Image (cartoon, grey):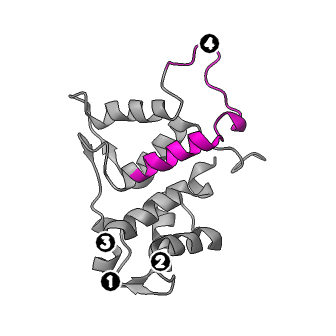
Amino acid sequence: AASAGKKVRTPTEDYVATVRALGIRPQPPTTGDSFANAMLWQYGSAGQAPYEWPAPNGYPEADAAWASAGRVLTSFAIHRDLAARWWPTEQARFPSYESLLPPMPATLAQVIDHQAVRMLGQKPNDAVRNGIAQLLGIPLGRRLSQDEALQYWTLRGILSSLLDSPLHLHR
């Protein structure tokens, strides 16, 4: 369709796509702090709690309804929380960070491209790739060992930055 890639995902679409992209497997909820329950709170905070729209016509599908700075910044915070595994984490299975890496050593560009293809189905453009390198303060051509790639903000920064990019935020 002509609109493909031009509309911002709704908060619920963004959340579900983020969980899928990160390989998170929610488990059936048995407590109030379960991942499944926290999902409701998180996309509710982004403006789209299930069954909360007062009119019978459902949440708007127009891009302008979901493209505000506040809504997008809330999604950025959710992406970071999930990529860094801060919250929610109870009653969910996460892949090991090691399993997300390409064969190591690899350049930063190779690690970024591997994550983008794994998570989003395509490599990022140069602007996204260069932005991630600048965020991390690591040149794209630098070869990283597995330990370097797994340093706290390296992989988490790549994951959350890709989720914050137009490749993920647009539908």
The correct choice, above or below, for 155 with respect to 28 in the image is: below
Q: Amino acid at mark 4?
A: Pro
Identity of the residue drawn at 41% across and 46% down: 19
The correct choice, above or below, for 127 with respect to 55 in the image is: below
Residue bearing mark 1: 145
Image disc number at residue 56? 4
Secondary structure at badge 2 equals: loop
Q: Amino acid at mark 1?
A: Ser
Spatial CA distance of label 1 from label 3 is 9 Å
Left or right: where 60 falls relative to 165: right
Nearer to us in this view, 52 or 91: 52
Spatial CA distance of label 2 from label 1 is 16 Å
Q: State yes or no: discs 1 and 4 in contact (Cβ < 8 Å).
A: no
Q: State yes or no: discs 1 and 3 in contact (Cβ < 8 Å).
A: no
Spatial CA distance of label 4 from label 3 is 47 Å
Spatial CA distance of label 3 from label 2 is 15 Å
What is the x, y in percent for residue 122?
57, 64
Q: Amino acid at mark 2?
A: Gly
Spatial CA distance of label 4 from label 2 is 49 Å
Label 1: few (<14), some (14–19) or many (≥20) C-alpha neighbours in 10 Å: some
> Tag 1 or tag 2, which sits nearer the N-term?
2
Residue bearing mark 3: 150
Image quadrant assignment for residue 100: bottom left
